[in-house]
Amino acid sequence: MRVPPPPKRLMTVVYSASMVIMVGYTLWLYAMGSYRDLLIPLFLSMLLLVSLLMHLGRGIRPCVPRILLLVSVYIVVLTSAYTQPNTSSMWLGLPIGATFLLLPLWSALSLNVVFLSAWWWLSTFETTPFSLSYVALALLLALPPWEHARRQALLRATDPNDSDCDAYHIDTLKERLNNEFQRAAMLNKRLAVLVIHLPQLDMAEEQFGHRAQTALLGALCSEVNSRCRDHDILGRAGNATFWLVLPDTSESGALLVRERLQRALSRRVLVETGQLEARIATCLPLRKESFERYVQRLEARANAIANV
């Protein structure tokens, strides 16, 4: 499981503070008359302003302004190291820390390996002590996100619920569905499943961030859970796909539930995405059908309504 991104307000403060610091440094160089050194700080000030505007705007992936901010940090440190030979190697810890704060764990480790390899060829410092310090600092900074990811994986293995909404995780969902499938086959009971797809989910994350996506998932789960029976099972089968397992329900009963849910969901309005849109399809097991085949039909039905 990936580590959740920092809150948008915190990242706004980071982008704003970075831009203010760089603009202040540029103005200080101008006031001191160091006109030859103005080019790079001026360029970085504009780059940080662009990253801030991209972060505040809509329709832009959050990783793009983070990459711009990380590039700015690397340019500042490397420029200082090569234009001022007396610069302490301690400042090289700044891009290392920024890498682990702005990128996922494995991406940050890979980038630091590439950076260390390049520094072996270009560095004017004593390479062996610097390399050992660099590796030690990188491993130390990698411990918090690694431990967080390990705890999240352990929680996911022991918690039946999805991490983002009030629905069962896919593994628990398939286990519960298998139990109901076997029960219906043995006792000659009826079973129905509603396949629910949220077409707005990907758009909400790209344009409004993770918070809007969580709000959309929460709205769907609250509406479905409040209008279903206690023994009905709602689980998240994919990023934007849910399965609602309806034990002891015929095809006509499943159609009634679908109409009731569609009316309720259409009346739910969110601030970012507007009216909640959901595509719902029914899927009943066939006579003498295996569970694996039934799961395949459920996944095919989900793909079909997703591509409408």
Image (cartoon, grey):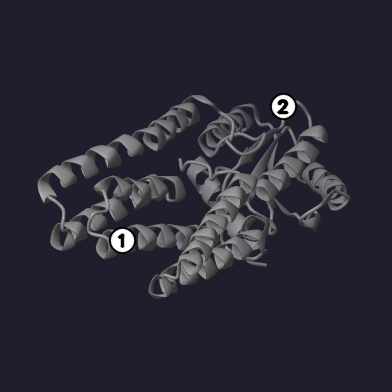
Rendered position, 175 above or below 297: above
The answer to whether residue 96 of the structure is visible from this angle is yes
Residue plotted at (62% across, 58% down): 202
Q: Is residue 191 left or right of residue 270?
A: left
Q: How many marks?
A: 2
277 vs 18, nearest the viewer:
18
Q: In this image, 252 relative to 116: left or right?
A: right
Q: Name the quadrant containing residue 40.
A: bottom left
Location of residue 138 by image quarter: top left
Residue 238 in the image: above or below residue 150: below
**Of helix, strand and loop, which one carries label 2?**
loop
Amino acid type for the residue under numbered disc 2: His
Residue carrying label 1: 78
Pinpoint residue 45: horizontal percent, then vertical percent. Answer: 52, 66
Above or below — where is 187 with respect to 88?
Answer: above
Residue picked out by circle 2: 231
Which is more N-terminal, label 2 or label 1?
1
Q: Residues within 10 Å of mark 1 (few under 14, many from 20)?
A: some
- For marks 1 and 2, give the one nearer the viewer: 1
Percent x, y for residue 168?
A: 60, 34
Q: Nearer the viewer, residue 229 or 81?
A: 81
Element on which disc 1 rests: helix
Is residue 233 rendered to the left or right of residue 267?
left
Q: Residue at x 55, y 50 (%)?
A: 14
User: Residue 186: where, in percent of width, then height?
Assistant: 59, 28
Q: In the picture shown, does residue 296 fall above or below 167? A: below
Q: Amino acid at mark 1?
A: Leu
Report the side of 270 relative to 39 (left or right).
Answer: right
Which quadrant, please, contains the C terminus?
A: bottom right
Alpha-carbon span between mark 1 and mark 2: 61 Å
